[in-house]
Image (tube, rainbow, N blue to C red):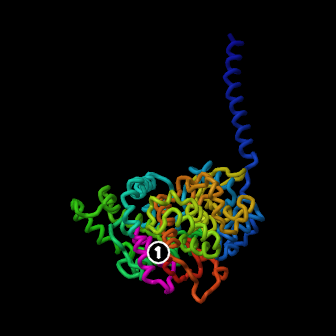
Amino acid sequence: MEVTTLVTGETNLFFPLILLSFLTFVIFKSINAPKKPLPPCPYAWPILGNILQMGKSPNVNLAKLAKVHGPLMSLRFGAQLVVVGSSPEAAAEILKINDRALSGRMVSDPIKVKGSKLHNLCPRFCDECDDGWRILRTICRTELFSTKAMQSQVEIREKNVMDLVKYLGAKSGQVVKIKDIGFACALNILGNAFFSMDLTDFEGKGLGERMSQYMRRSAELGGVPQLSDLYPILSGWDLQRFYKKLMGSIEKIFAFWIDIAEERRKNKNDVSSTPACIDALIGMGLTNQQINPLLWELFTGGTESTSATTEWALTELLRNQEAMEKLRNELTEVIGKDTIRESNLSELPYLEACVKETPRLHPPGPLILRRAIQTCEVMGYTIPKGCQVKVNMWAIARDPTIWDDPWSFKPERFLMSGLDYKGMNFEYIPFGSGRRMCPGIPLASRVVPLVLASLVHHFDWFLPGNMNPSEINMNEMFDVFVKKKEPLCLIPMIRK
């Protein structure tokens, strides 16, 4: 009996000791296990970090740093850790493999002020891909940019483009600014889609006369680094009065369509009115406080990117007369002297190639912005929770190991490549990839080629003062979007 009791007591003590030893071993190993390092980093100055190395063209300077420090590198912007990917492999790991872990967005600290009219109210300013963000994306996908919505607006878009052609016909022999007329056309296309009305004329007059100024002002403000983002100790302090300045411009934009929204609410049962996207948003029960920031994001992104891409495309065609001639021959063969319709676009492969080549060289948004909502591993390195993550599309699109003669405008590279806008070929992602991908692809992929084809098909273009196209200033200006620093001014002449 005594022996049995002794053995039983030893047995009861033996298993807890084994378990305790095992747990001690596991904890010891986890504490002393080698941790994955951060990506390599160039020398960072005390307090400032690497911010002075960014200059006015961060996409270009980040590409230069990547050549020295590798396709995945880390930097310090003040006290903020930033990781930058500059290769298709890095882009795939960030935007596909770790899409969920890196699905956050760094929302500027001043915008997160209590009572903010932007924070978590439009996709751009949603911290995470939560239920609120998913609702906004669903609205974009099903109500604003669905196939049905696109088809219902075909005739209106074609009319807006023909209005542009008629205006330029009246301006034959006079100097016009391409970005301004492209902006006006895009603004009216969106105005008709959302409100069933033109918002401006091609002289910049009308309801949208000052709207465009405020939209550009808000884009400029969005490109200014905020001290409270660089130094979290300043969190909650809008020392640069960023939010006040930004909302000063944005609220003036809101004012343009609040009256329109209220009028549509009163007449929502009027069957004589032309259906518009604003009606769908009102029908879903959205308030003005919900509609305003969503429309602001879509109008700002849609007009600036469309006008900038059109301007760059025409610039590149003028500088590459062989490509211009190929495009004109294709248009003549397929269209003849008729007006170009959206239904013709699928028959114009060289036009599509020209449109695809333009954002490869000149992506409107060259840096894809993400934030780590949890710690993860990319290319063998640690990406800590809260870290900003950027994918430098500009660097990828100009990498000579990926693209033949990457600095040249060569639409032919897209004729047989099979590359598209779907974001699964990480050497070419002009609209981004993953869950944060641009929702406006269905509209942009119709409007830009229709506008560009109409400009090339109906007009010969000349530079003022008989300037040689090779002398066009190709310098960029970076805020939220990348634009031509010196606007393209041309003289249209009606083609016979």
Q: Nearer the viewer, residue 172 or 277?
A: 172
- The residue at the point 57 percent across, 87 percent down is 464
- The residue at the point 29 percent across, 57 percent down is 283
Magenta stretch: dominant secondary structure? helix
Q: Can you give x and y, in whole percent of width and height, for residue 166 in the image? A: 41, 77
Judged left or right of residue 32, residue 220 is left
Judged left or right of residue 31, residue 115 is left
Amino acid on which the number 1 mark rests in the picture: Phe
- The answer to if 122 sits in the magenta stretch is no
Judged left or right of residue 239, residue 55 is right
Q: Secondary structure at mark 1?
A: helix
Tell me which segment is drawn in magenta: 160-189
Residue 226 seen in this snapshot = no
Where 373 falls versus 47 (above or below)?
Answer: above
Q: Nearer the viewer, residue 208 or 313?
A: 313
Q: Residue furthest top?
A: 1
Where 233 falls versus 12 (above or below)?
Answer: below
Which of the 4 image quarters holds residue 350? bottom right
Characterize the local packing of mark 1: few (<14), some (14-19) or many (20 or more) Cα atoms within 10 angstroms: many
Q: Residue furthest bottom?
A: 465
Q: Can you give x and y, in whole percent of width and height, for residue 257 in the image? A: 34, 71
Q: Provide the residue designation for mark 1.
A: 183
Label tally: 1
- The residue at the point 38 percent across, 82 percent down is 205
Where 300 falls versus 386 (above or below)?
Answer: below
Judged left or right of residue 71, residue 438 is left
- The answer to if 178 sits in the magenta stretch is yes
Q: Can you give x and y, in whole percent of width and height, for residue 98 in the image? A: 61, 50
